């Protein structure tokens, strides 16, 4: 199963957008599922339902960081290349979806929401495009990973 499909499946099981995206890549990152799900738990709903950066985008960035991130705080060149990669992922997601900001993606206006998650009902899934956004983030990441593998083999 493609990671994008796995991410959507995890979201539909009830995991938040960041968890679903990030945890779909446990096989790629080597992180145990329970650790990954805890690590990503704070970022659903645009950072704990603050409706800031979409959790699917955050999950995508975390996977890219684990796979392609830098380790030295003094290596400005490598840091800049990584930030360039992350900005390109953000740009691609924004071009395909209109924003990387949760409240804009869900057309919620400027309000922040309380900490209690919405119940996952059939109506929720029908009116929220989150499963689609999680799948989209996964597809973008799958394409990046495939590109990086091809680049390494040349």
Image (spheres, helix red, strand yellow):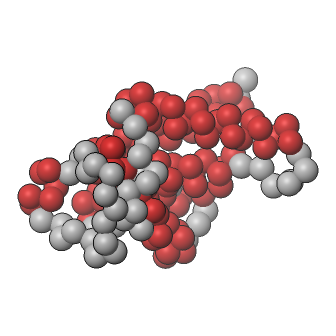
Most foreground residue, 135 or 126: 126
Residue pictured at 34% horizontal, 74% vertical = 115
Residue pictured at 25% horizontal, 60% vertical = 12
Q: Is residue 149 left or right of residue 102?
A: right
Q: Residue furthest top?
A: 154
Q: Is residue 106 left or right of residue 146?
A: left
Is residue 29 at all visible to an observer of this figure? yes
The quarter of the picture where the C terminus appears is top right
Residue pictured at 75% horizontal, 35% vertical = 81
Point out residue 3 in the picture as x, y percentages from the top left corner.
Answer: 42, 48
Reply above or below: 19 against 84: below
How many marks the image carries: the answer is: 0
Q: Is residue 17 left or right of residue 85?
A: left
Q: Residue furthest left?
A: 123
Q: Residue furthest right?
A: 74
Reply above or below: 82 against 96: below
Is residue 19 at all visible to an observer of this figure? no
Point out residue 8 in the picture as x, y percentages from the top left corner.
Answer: 31, 52
Point out residue 62 in the picture as x, y percentages from the top left corner.
Answer: 58, 55
Residue pictured at 49% horizontal, 66% vertical = 40
Q: Is residue 111 left or right of residue 50?
A: left
Point out residue 66 in the picture as x, y percentages from the top left corner.
Answer: 65, 55
């Amino acid at each position: 199963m493609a990671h994008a499909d796995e991410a959507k499946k995890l979201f539909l099981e009830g995991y938040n957008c960041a968890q679903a995206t990030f945890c779909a890549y446990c096989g790629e990152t080597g992180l145990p599922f329970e650790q990954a799900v805890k690590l990503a738990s704070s970022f659903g709903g645009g950072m704990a339902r603050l409706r800031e950066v979409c959790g699917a985008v955050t999950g995508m960035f975390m996977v890219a960081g684990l796979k392609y991130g830098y380790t030295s705080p003094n290596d400005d060149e490598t840091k800049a290349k990584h930030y360039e990669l992350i900005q390109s992922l953000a740009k691609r997601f924004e071009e395909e979806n209109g924003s990387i900001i949760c409240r804009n993606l869900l057309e919620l206006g400027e309000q922040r929401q309380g900490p209690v998650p919405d119940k996952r009902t059939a109506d929720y899934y029908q009116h929220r495009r989150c499963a689609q956004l999680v799948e989209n983030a996964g597809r973008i990441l799958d394409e990046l990973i495939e590109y990086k593998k091809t680049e390494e083999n040349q």
